[in-house]
Amino acid sequence: MGNHKGDHSQRRTAQFCTQRCLLGLQTGGALDDLCPNVEHHRRGQNDLTLHRISAEGLVILLKNDLDENINRCIPFGGSGSYGAPFKLTCMEYGYTVVGKGTISRLWEEVSREVEVYRILQKAQGLAVPVFLGTIDLAKNVLWSKELGRALIIDFRRFTLNRRRVVAE
């Protein structure tokens, strides 16, 4: 598994990929030489101009990372009325992107953004951020503001015990 503390430290200090880099990933285009992570993207390949994976592949890897350990997403900034931004890093390929977390009750509202990104496809990477895909986490996650971390709750297998009344 590797060094979890070192892994977390690398994720925390990783720089975000450029929009041009992410657009190349999304469209199957070229790497961006100005991306701070371009050397990591190039590792282990012969063609140094193209991305080694697709946007879909990156989204799957990020989902697998989060399913394994939700603390691999690093919150930053404040949360809004529909979600909170998270820093996500795929250590294998060196992609660092912004994710938006929300609660299941708001998913219908937030998922409409997917259609907006499709409509604005040609503006992505220029006037609109590049959209790579959605992730539906397998686990129920609650954000603890006090602890500054996500809590994983298994609501499917919980049992609720009535509070016993204690006579005074």
Image: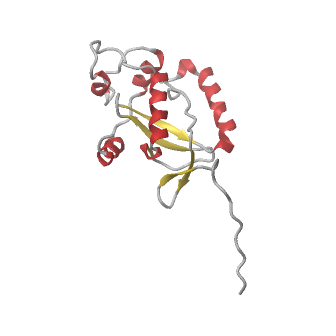
Percent from the top left, x then y, of residue 132?
A: 51, 26
User: As drawn, is 56 to the left or to the right of 95?
Assistant: right
Which quadrant holds the N terminus?
top left
Which quadrant holds the C terminus?
bottom right
Scheme of colours in the image:
secondary structure
User: As drawn, is 42 to the left or to the right of 27?
Assistant: left
Percent from the top left, x then y, of residue 52?
A: 36, 19
Q: Nearer the viewer, residue 137 or 73?
A: 137
Residue sitting farthest toward the top: 47
Residue at the (30%, 41%) spot, across then down: 2
Answer above or below: position of 54 versus 61. Answer: above
Answer above or below: position of 72 versus 133. Answer: below
| Residue 33, image quadrant | top left
User: As drawn, is 68 to the left or to the right of 119?
Assistant: left
Residue at the (47%, 20%) spot, across then down: 26
Residue at the (43%, 24%) spot, across then down: 22
Residue sitting farthest toward the bottom: 168
Q: Nearer the viewer, residue 16 or 141?
A: 141
User: As drawn, is 150 to the left or to the right of 33?
Assistant: right
Percent from the top left, x then y, of residue 107?
A: 65, 38
Percent from the top left, x then y, of residue 74?
A: 43, 45
